[in-house]
Image: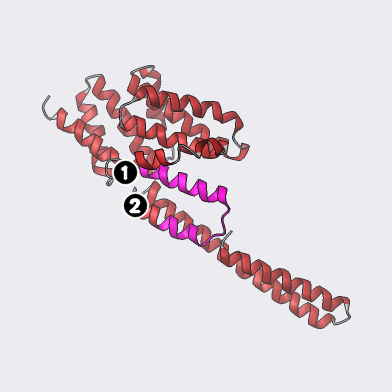
Amino acid sequence: MVKRNFWLRMVIMLLALTGMINILFNQTEVGLIIIFLSLVVLWINVMLNAKDKKKYQQIAMLFLEKLDVEAYIEEYTKFRANLYTNDFEKSIDELSILLCKTTISHKYPIYDELMAKVEVEKEYSSVEKFLYYQAWFEYYLDQRNIGKAEYMQYQMERLYPRLPVQIKKYISKEISVNRLTLNVYLKEHIPQTEMILSRLLQQKISKLSFIQTMYLLGIISYNQKDYLTANYRFSYVYNNSNDTKWKEAAKAYLDVLETI
């Protein structure tokens, strides 16, 4: 809850209670005026909440559409600092930011941060564990340690039934994309994987998801020796992925393609 919202709600409740007390003691006119004031404050609170929601959406766009990860982390941290959060919410924020950092792992090593949370992992809820394992999954992919990435995927799949219903629909997408990613790296089920990834590009997805998908399709084309298509896909990733790890990875493939 935004700190401002907390105090506004206290004011609304106090005004409403004061108004009702005045009405009970036959001071109807004063009571109605005070209740009217509480409604005014409530309207102000609703308008400010709408403004906060719009602000958060703008911050999210820094990550999902502009791929400006560092700017997103900075703005998100400032936004959340204005909230009353419990220990669980603070932990979720930390893990979410850590997961965001995996997209710039080429310039921001996250191993130490991942290791720093090993001891507290046993106390995590299922949601916290999922975010933590997803960060490890991304790390192992970057290290090309596919065996350990598979293990983290297995752990996340085991967690899925225990997750809250309201977030399962978001988590299920992550699990599916992870599986497709592993298929690409393991060179398994490629026809089906390529078809699903190609269809994904036709859907309304964020620029971040589009870049990830194009990169995976680029690897598939490269492995199939379809170098023309691979060059197109990696060039798109290189030119549109800002300063994320996919830009550097695409450049590595493009350098090799220049020699073929």
> Does 150 sit above or below residue 55?
above
Residue under the point 39% across and 44% down: 100
Which residue position holds label 2? 70
Spot occupied by residue 211 in the image (x, y as percentages of width and height): 33, 38
Distance from label 1 to label 2 (Cα)? Answer: 9 Å
Residue farthest to the front? Answer: 119
Residue 99 within the segment the image draws in magenta: yes
Could you tell me if residue 202 is visible in this image?
A: no
Spot occupied by residue 126 in the image (x, y as percentages of width and height): 56, 36
Helix, strand, or loop for circle 2?
helix
Helix, strand, or loop for circle 1?
helix
> Does 15 sit above or below residue 251?
below
Residue farthest to the left? Answer: 259
Few, some or many residues within 10 Å of mark 1 (<14, 14–19, 20+): many
* Observer-nearest of 63 and 158: 158
Which residue position holds label 1? 104
* Observer-nearest of 103 and 187: 103
Residue under the point 12% across and 24% down: 260
* Observer-nearest of 201 and 4: 4
Q: Earlier in the sequence, mark 1 or mark 2?
A: 2
Q: Quadrant of the N terminus?
A: bottom right
Considering the whole magenta stretch, tell me its main secondary structure: helix
